[in-house]
Image (cartoon, helix red, strand yellow):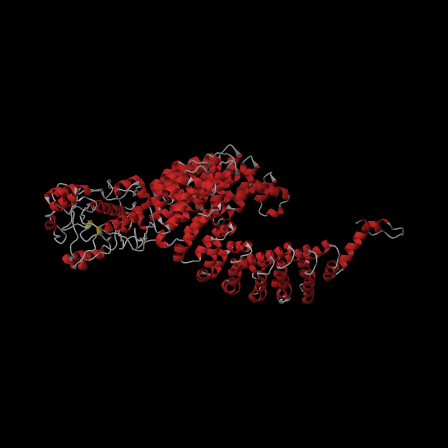
Amino acid sequence: MSATLLPCEGSSTGDSPVPAALDFVSQDEMLTPLGRLDKYAASENVFNRQMVARSLLDTLREVCDDERDCVAVLERISRLADDSEPTVRAELMEQVPHIALFCQENRPSIPCAFSKYLLPIVVRYLADQNNQVRKTSQAALLALLEQELIERSDVETRVCPVLTELTAPDSNDDVKTEAVAIMCKMAPMVGKDITERLILPRFCEMCCDCRMFHVRKVCAANFGDICSVVGQQATEEMLLPRFFQLCSDNVWGVRKACAECFMAVSCATCQEIRRTKLSALFINLISDPSRWVRQAAFQSLGPFISTFASPSSSGQYFKEESESSEDTSTEDKHRIRNQDVLEDVQIRPEDVPSDLRVSNSSINLESLLEGPAAETSRKSPGEISVPVDSSLLCTLSSEPRQEAASNENDRKPGHYKSTFRPEAGTSCHDSALLDQELYNSFHFWRTPLPEIDLDTELEQDSGESLSPERPEAAPGVPASCSPNISMATRRELEEMIENLEPHIDDPDVKAQVQVLSAALRASCLDAHEESSGVARRSDLPDELGINELPNCKLTPDDSVPLICDAVESVDSAPHYAHDDSDVSTSSGFSPEEERRAKVQDVVPQALLDQYLSMTDPSRAQTVDTEIAKHCAYSLPGVALTLGRQNWHCLRETYETLASDMQWKVRRTLAFSIHELAGILGDQLTAADLVPIFNGFLKDLDEVRIGVLKHLHDFLKLLHIDKRREYLYQLQEFLVTDNSRNWRFRAELAEQLILLLELYSPRDVYDYLRPIALNLCADKVSSVRWISYKLVSEMVKKLHMATPPTFGVDLINELVENFGRCPKWSGRQAFVFVCQTVIEDDCLPMDQFAVHLMPHLLTLANDRVPNVRVLLAKTLRQTLLEKEYFLASASCYQEAVEQTIMALQMDQDSDVKYFASIHPASTKISQDAMSTASSTY
């Protein structure tokens, strides 16, 4: 630098001295763009050459009109690419995507520029000796592919062959690892065809690289991306065997990478492979010796379970059949419901040899009878049939039989007739009724049926029957059982009970379980009781007209409560039984048997058991301290996969997470509780989620904000009566742990705008109005801005109500509390509300002119300029834009014009500016403009 400045000092001649720096600048200005490029490209100074690389795009823009100059610049880029300095090459590669985009936009003047000059440099740098240059070229290649600047033919003939060569066995280790990563990342960009032909074979080879675990780790980390590109067939045929090898790799980092991408791999396979092969493989990862592998596996467990989801199991679809008005209420017609209560329970054939079908109006335990009677007996589509011994037949029927009722049963309205199923040809009328019964209210939620106990009465008088004329009569409950039940049949009954127990919440299923339990206990009676029971019932078949079944018996010990005690009102919301002890007692199972009975077949049970164990405190010590948070994060997806019919499997886990000591876990649940409510439906939401939701409302602010952000989404799923209960708690959201947490109040205002549609005008006026007015006076302007919108929407809703008295009262309160407020901020808030009402058309203009405008115009004489400035802006920019005030020659228009004229003569320059017809003609500094805009 001193040498450059040296000539400046010396000039003994009479000419004015010219600094050397100025000479230097003037010489550069005299050069052409290409001349400057050549000058600095040949410089020995590294920084000069870096500047050349950095200025290439600007040079191209200067010469873009001349094709020859553009080609000359591109040729110089090729020479610059041979620079020996890595920093120059890296700088050049950073500019290549921008230059390529410029060439693409100017293709007519620079044809084939990228393919001829730039792409060879990018490909060559992929194998550069310098790590920084390689990294830069890899990023440039991906950017070019993402922007589709590389022709498909170039990808096939020039890019993929180079990457294949770089992944050869004799290639450099670092280069090979990076090339594999590039191949994986570019696969989604080049598509399935190129990936299958040119990338997949080499990728499979790299998965088995025995020498370098780094290569296998990169393959494992990107395995899911490759699977999603090539599709199911190639995944199952070529990739899955490699994936199994990677999951059992001797390096824990490879296994950890496999666990992290497990969900993506699962999505690319069929349900059978997912269930039979991937599930067992995932269980191995969960029990891996390495803690880091287990940690990654548990984090991926919930997402992996979600890949088993299907509409048939999740129940998230509407039943297509129409309902009659007498079957369900209007609200029930819109309720999401499973198409059949047990249709989605897919009991495995090895567990239950026969199909289980939901009963429309009867639940039958029908034996697989041998002989002509069995061959001719018919099964209605609405019955549940399970195999038992040939001498066992139990029927639970709700259809009134046209048989004579005894006087004994007429005197006992709480008991109903026990009947047995007649032969096929006994009634043609019943056959016709079955076609009409294919659809009834049993397909949807049904109130619990009354509990009945027939055993004692039937023992006293086996021929008794009840009158069928009672319309409210619940199904009769027989307890007929065989003394000759084999051990195999007993095991079948136990398996069927285990499969039905998880769905005990459904009244139909509960009845089935209890009937099966009665049959199971009856099979265990001793021989003396069996023989005495047969003797006591020797005359029963003749009285009941079923001579073909002489081996049925009833004993006092067979008595079992089949249906819930309380008969709930049809209008009341159905309640769910959540007390597991009740289920155990009614079915005669021990707690351990109960636990084993809580199974489902939507996902492999082993996976669900591992997921439920994530709340175990020992997991936090042996796996991950935040494992409960991961469990909470994926719980809605798991619940959707299992379906609401299997919610009982997750209920206890959800309650445990909701009471977790870590507020981050509770916060995660709070943010997703509305999603879970949509999955479970209003019934289960009211029973299981509402109590937890109420607890979150009283939690820390970090948790409360979760429920507040989705308050509308959750409350809209509740019944109107339950929804109204939260009106009393909305006021509590105004109180926060930290008074400076203004975002909490801003979110409350946002949610209140949405909640207006859920409540009646009376509720809005009584409960939401005080909160809205409180927020309008908030200390933070952002909260007030949203609150003005809230109040204007409230005015709109109340004005549209019939009669609009609530709207008028609200307007009067606005005028009194804000329009005449002693504080200028309150009066300014009133102008803001009026402005919002006008902009959003919340009131008809004639109503606005009557109720609000007179009070608005009086503020023209306000002593605070800030209020008058806002008034001038509102009148000039908002009010006078409405057709009502432009077209009509009413007194209102005259009053507005007079007010504006007065404001134009105001002493304050800002007021005059905004009230002026031609604001540009008024001299006002930019500073004043910025002050006005920032204040208002």
> Residue sitting at 59 percent across and 46 percent down?
919
Question: How many numbered dots are placed on residues in this image?
Answer: 0
Residue 460 position (above or below residue 127): above
Residue extending farthest top: 822
**Location of residue 47 in the rendering, given as x and y in whole percent from the top left corner:** 72, 53
- 234 left or right, relative to 14: left
**Location of residue 903 in the rendering, given as x and y in whole percent from the top left corner:** 56, 41
Instruction: Check the picture and name the quadrant holding the C terminus.
Output: top right
Look at the image and tell me whether residue 306 can be seen: yes
**Location of residue 651 in the rendering, given as x and y in whole percent from the top left corner:** 36, 43
- 90 left or right, relative to 243: right
Residue 692 position (above or below residue 220): above
> Residue sitting at 79 percent across and 53 percent down?
22
**Location of residue 565 in the rendering, given as x and y in whole percent from the top left corner:** 23, 40
Nearer to me, 72 or 512:
512
Nearer to me, 305 or 828:
305
Nearer to me, 797 or 508:
508
Look at the image and tell me whether residue 799 can be seen: no
> Residue sitting at 36 percent across and 39 percent down?
724
Residue extending farthest right: 13
Nearer to me, 377 or 176:
176
